[in-house]
Image (cartoon, grey):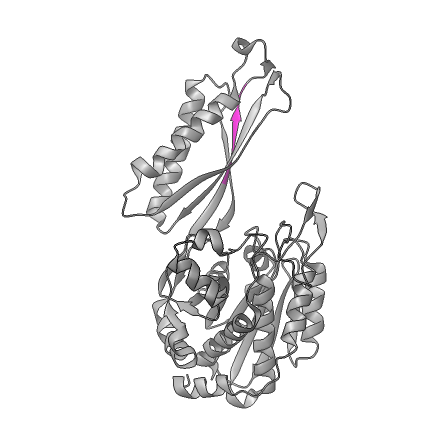
Amino acid sequence: MAESPAIAEFVKNHGVDLSWQREFYQDLHEHPELSGQEQETAQRILRRLSDINCEVISPIGGFGIVAVLRNGEGPCALFRADFDALPVEETTGVPFASTRMRPGVNGELTHVMHACGHDMHTTALMGLLKVLDERRDVWHGTFLALFQPSEENGRGAETMVADGLVDRIPRPDVCLGQHIMPGRAGEVQTMAGAQFAACDSIRIIIPGRSAHGSMPHQAIDPTFIAAMIVVRLQAIVSREVNPNDFAVVSVGTLKAGSTNNIIPATAELVLNCRFYDDSVKRHVYAAIRRVVEAECQASGCEAQPTFQFFGHGEMINNHPEVFQTVRPVFDEVFGPDSVTAHRTTVSEDFANIPRAFGVPYMYWVIGCTPRQVWDHAVATKRVAQDVPVNHQSTFLPEYEPTVYATTHAALSAILAYLG
């Protein structure tokens, strides 16, 4: 591993032309694709990779791609970027804004937008590849650039693993990744330990008995049962979880019935749950099951409710030894813009990749909000009102500081192992 000052000097003066990144980023942003539909995006990535002296392994897990750069003996490091988009109608007003509409999960046309920054993640990783390819004199070993589809639905990493990722690429010694989020543009935020929460979604089907709306006594009303469950769920975190711990149980959807005068046969609840601790998660899931089954029993349901878990995201729990290796390099490269992160309640599926290999990892956050906007919002306590956040129609990173920080943070971290 190289010394931090030497890495910092190279990162700041690597001499590789990265001006093409703007056009590449805007092209990705203007042509987003939903999870599982990223064929065009994968082709854009593959065309760019044709200019780099690397081995390309594709497809892996749908539209997943791994580019392998070999440069003699040495360690092996992996860096991951995701590239799917969201069913959001863009309102940024920029010339390269998305106007696309594509079939959503229900088959109906929906607007599509890169509202989470995956286009920036991909642009940064492509820039890192370009520098490592042109400046092989400063590193040795093997570099793996993993481009992952389907992060937004929580399936992409697991699908790549299920498609033989572990056997199809060299085993890395460390896995690294990053995400842009609201914050001072270009600020690199790192921490050891729990960074992103673990999450699951739960689809619950409440079994009732249908009847005409004029004869409720002949029904077992699943809508009423679902409403009671929603109320009771709110007490789990507030009354059963230690206030020093963290848990979220949110009801995302409640669906029942299709017309005004028929009590339906079933109702559906979809929950989203988040945790930093597995023991808390186990307790909350047992409580959810207890509440649902008890409400169904209290209303005389003739069948048992069903529970389907999906949308799983592993907690991102940064390994201390990786943090201790990478953070000093960030401090040298970014100076006062290398800061300590706060853990966040959002979730990611990145950790499924290093977990499959059984190797340590680190995942960090980079701010992308214009600094004057962020600082004013913080000073006036209006961050929630004035700062566009991921998954909103107005979300758009400030390009220059964000692309510089994401590209050069990735380069710095990789050189901490391969330099």
Residue 274 in sight from this viewpoint = yes
Image location of residue 114, percent across then percent down: 61, 58
Quadrant for the N terminus, please: bottom left
Q: Residue at x 41, y 19 (%)?
A: 298
Q: Is residue 366 visible?
A: no
Considering every residue shown, the one lying at the far bottom of the view is: 137
Image-based side of 370 in relation to 191, left or right: right
Q: What is the span of residues highlighted in magenta in the rendered image?
A: 202-208
State whether residue 272 is above or below residue 35.
Answer: above
Looking at the image, which residue is at 66% across and 52% down?
112
* Foreground residue among 3 and 27: 27
**The magenta stretch spans residue 348:** no
On screen, residue 164 above or below 237: below
Residue 328, x across and y down, in percent: 37, 78
Q: Position of residue 361 (x, y in %)?
A: 43, 67
* Quadrant assignment, res 119: bottom right
Q: 258 or 173: nearer the eye?
A: 258
At a point 66% along the width and 67% down the height, the residue shown is: 26
Counting labels gives 0
Position above or below: 210 against 356: above
Residue 406: where, in percent of width, then height?
52, 71
| Residue in front for this viewpoint, 78 or 126 | 126
Magenta: main secondary structure: strand
